[in-house]
Image (cartoon, coloured by chain):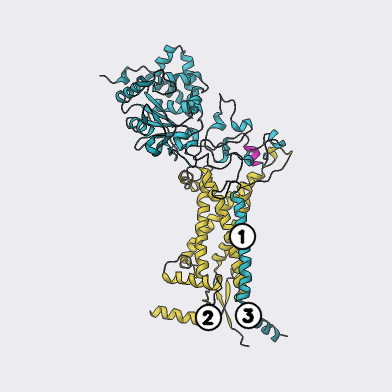
Amino acid sequence: MNSTSTKRPTYYEELRRKGYSRREFMQFCTMIAAYMGLEANGVAQVSEALMSHPRVPVIWLHFQECTCCSESFIRSSHPMVADIILDKISLDYTETLMAAAGHQAEAAMEKTMKDSYGEYVLCVEGSVPVYEDGAYCCIGGRSAVDILDEAAAGAKAVIGWGSCACNGCVQAASPNPTGATPIHKLIKGKPIIKVPGCPPIGEVMAGVLVHLVTFGRIPELDRIGRPKAFYSKRVHDSCYRRPFYDAGLFVESFDDENAKKGYCLYRVGCKGPTTYNACGIMRWNDGVSYPIQSGHGCIGCSEENFWDNGSFYTRVPNFPGFGIESNADKIGIAAAGLTAAGLTAHAVGTRLKRKKEHDKILEEGIDNANELN
Amino acid sequence: MKTVRLRRVYVWQMPVRIFHWINALCILVLGVTGYLISNPPVFLSNAEASNSFWFGTNRFIHFTTAYIFLSMLIMRLYWAFVGNKYASWRNFIPINKKFIQKIGGVLKHDILLLKTEEDVSIGHNALAGFSYFMFFLLTLIMIVTGFGLYADSSTWFLPKLFAWVPALFGGDYLVREIHHVTMWILVVFILIHLYLVFLHDQYEGRGETSAMISGYKFIEEEVIEKQKEERQIERIA
């Protein structure tokens, strides 16, 4: 049997067959190259790659998740994003969108894994529960841990879609009853691209896939494993409300005058200063808006542990183990107060216990002073 | 009554004193500006954002002071190896049994107020020295977390050296929290430090407080003679 990849049509061929014009194809290439942060000549690279490279087989697994990543993806602004990626990237297996079901679907996945061993891209949406031998998430009678192990073995690269796959998201929040685990802790020896967010921006997801196709390798990643092109800046540093922050003009509550004026949401708990994402630049729904623009602070959905990082509406972190109303400042003030009280008590104790020493020095000092009278 | 003869001993050399006061000033400035960053006051203001930059300035002061703080710490580290015996790193790190015994002695006499004989220390007493080592570790946490948070906004290599810190903790959030909580530990430390300085000055009358300005402490003749003898015995042994 010949390698299936030589039989696969290129992305461009598929798009033409679907009825897109070359102009539309070039528009897409230009847009996605800009999103990926490529130079102007990157457009040519992208179009060249999509015209000459055969489709990359993709297996898209869903584990503990809400499918918001898929939803975000199919709603990415340019219709061709959905078409090129979903229809044409050869999504050989994805529970949500494939036509097949049951044994047929499992067979399709097995076939892709066998035929394209070492070639396919494995996309994982959702975290993987590891407690009770993985019983908390089973598909087709097999546990998520099993399926992931098998699928990862033959993957060229692995993409973790969304916060579930990248850091566990809400299932992994304390007390994490199912042992929800992000995929990088389970897959060893494969390049893993983390695309966190709840969900990630559709264009970001498309950009990552197109990068893989265009350059045949994974995009440049930061230390945490996220593509630098989209996750190297804080939401705060690309926020259009940033001048209000620097000017010290803050919203105090959501119904005050300052909120109407569109001041900075820092004091009402905006997590923009600790969140790395492209929301401030690419925005959502075809660049219409993003949470901060809609008047609500960033909740830091693409950051590690974001469900346990305290309230969405307070600035100063909650302090674990000291009750809900406690925060670091209140405890700090209490600790300083207690210390001051302790020191006062110690001062009194010293006065009582060391009176003799004290008086000796004092007496000596007085004597010497008297000599001068 | 017998008058005690005091002798002037040059304990704190100039670099130590300069370090101490600039360090104190830095911590004060960093503490205040840092608190404002974490919890800025709200003004109902009609001012245009373009005319105002106080919060940006506040942050600028915080970051600039951090650089001064770091450079002073490096200077002090250097001095721990070339300075006099009271400035040496040996005063801070409990490397031998004797040091630990001395910590116990200070604990009994000064803190628990037991009726033990005073073991006069001309420089830092053992417990104080050890507590300054702990303080040093805390400031190291502040520097590592602070520059870690700052790394991303900087293009210079020095803050970039700390870019691994947020990655280690999974993101900025936890690093921020550590930075914030550690400051409160420093506040508690400073309270205790100030109290003990005044306490020693009051009960020993050796010029504990002014020593950090002039460099001199005033030590009883007999204490000096006794310590000289001890040193000689140590040398022979």
Q: Which mark is residue A198?
A: none
- The magenta stretch is A240-246
Q: Could you tell me the amino acid type at mark 2?
A: Val
- Vertical comparison of A204 with A357: above or below: above
User: Disc count in the image?
Assistant: 3
Q: Could you tell me the amino acid type at mark 3?
A: Ile
What residue would you read off at disc 2? B223
Separation of residues labelled 2 and 3 (CA atoms): 15 Å
Per the image, is A269 magenta?
Answer: no
Left or right: A242 as drawn, with respect to B83: right
Badge 3 crowding class, 10 Å Cα cut-off, few under 14, some 14 to 19, many 20 or more, is some
Position of the N terminus of chain A, as image quadrant, is top left
Sequence-wise, which precedes: disc 3 or disc 1?
1
Q: Colour of chain B?
A: yellow
Separation of residues labelled 2 and 1 (CA atoms): 36 Å
- Vertical comparison of B205 with B177: above or below: below
